[in-house]
Amino acid sequence: MINNSTVNRDKWFARFLCVVIACGLWLYVMSEQNPIVEKEFAVPLAQRNLADGMIVFNVPEKVSVRVRGTRTALADMPLSDIFAFVNLSKLSVGTHTILVNARFARGDVVQVSPPSVNLFIDVKKDKIVPVTAEIVGSPNKDFAVEEHMLTPSEVKVSGAATRLEALEKIFVPVDVGGRSEDFTVTQKPLAMAKDGMDMQDVLIDPAEIIVRTKLKKRIQTASLPVKVSFKGNLPEGLKLTSATVNPFKVNVFGTPSVIEPLKELELEPVNLDTVTKDGTIPVKIVLPAGVKAARQTVDVDVTVGENVKENEEKKSE
């Protein structure tokens, strides 16, 4: 005969067995539908516990972190759930090899690459440095740069002490290509090391410089020969024997665009109608627009003689 206690025990055992089977089925289904997977992420590398007044170099911006978790947990999760960092506590000036740490809020960290980083720690310093302007390009050929006015004319440069020792200059490039008038631009100051390389690991304050550039006209000089011309006729019985210009060359000056094309200077024509004997005639120089000369006139020395042929023809008549 089966007593009640045996029946109750069998009932509870059956119920427990059902629960175990149900849990097993649930785990089986979940493992099939939402399995454990691994995935790799590129995450920012943070710095922790760096002492005040110190600065660190050679730390990569990102590291690769492989994590393990359920497919659901890894799907569409925010990257902030993975945190990678280096602990810079109590590190002195110099080179150090530091392990990279990583934490994953939804599972396990499998691997960090690189597992460690080589970095350099230095003292942070400030330095006041004058700013210079460096010309880029060439202005209009008739103009030259007279001066640059920089506001401000000095900047504060912040960075590692060893880097500031390598600093050669702070400058702003000013493009004057084709310019013919004064102009104002706002430029970003740049740092250059003594080896000629750009220094992008220093901070420049302020980050912008106002550059006012003043241009001036270029003046070019040239020594040009003088060309003499004539009008009218000598009186009967005379002929022009010679005409000499003194000085033969005249110094002129003006902008390159008007001076460079000139090969010679012209004079106002000498009026032969008034010439009756040898003499020196002051003649005005004809100057093109925009050209100035060291003198306004030159002397033309003329000599005349008897026109024998003409006189003989008259006698024969």
Image (cartoon, rainbow, N blue to C red):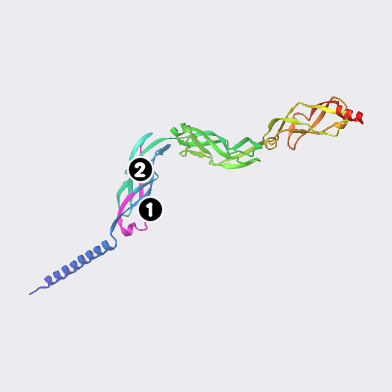
Q: As drawn, is 27 to the left or to the right of 241?
A: left
Instruction: Give the residue at x 26% y 62%.
Output: 32
Residue closest to the eye, 146 or 7:
146
In reply to whether residue 66 is colored magenta, the answer given is yes
Residue closest to the eye, 139 or 57:
139
Q: Badge 1, how many Cα within 10 Å: few under 14, some, many 20+?
A: few
Quadrant housing residue 163: top left
Mark closest to the chain's N terminus, 2 or 1: 1
Instruction: Give the residue at x 56% y 39%.
Output: 173
Residue carrying label 2:
86
Residue carrying label 1:
79
The residues colored magenta run 65-90
Q: As drawn, is 46 to the left or to the right of 189?
A: left
Up the image or down, 217 lies above or below 245; here it is: below
Q: Residue 249: percent from the left, percent from the top? A: 73, 28
How far apart are the alpha carbons under marks 2 and 1? Answer: 18 Å
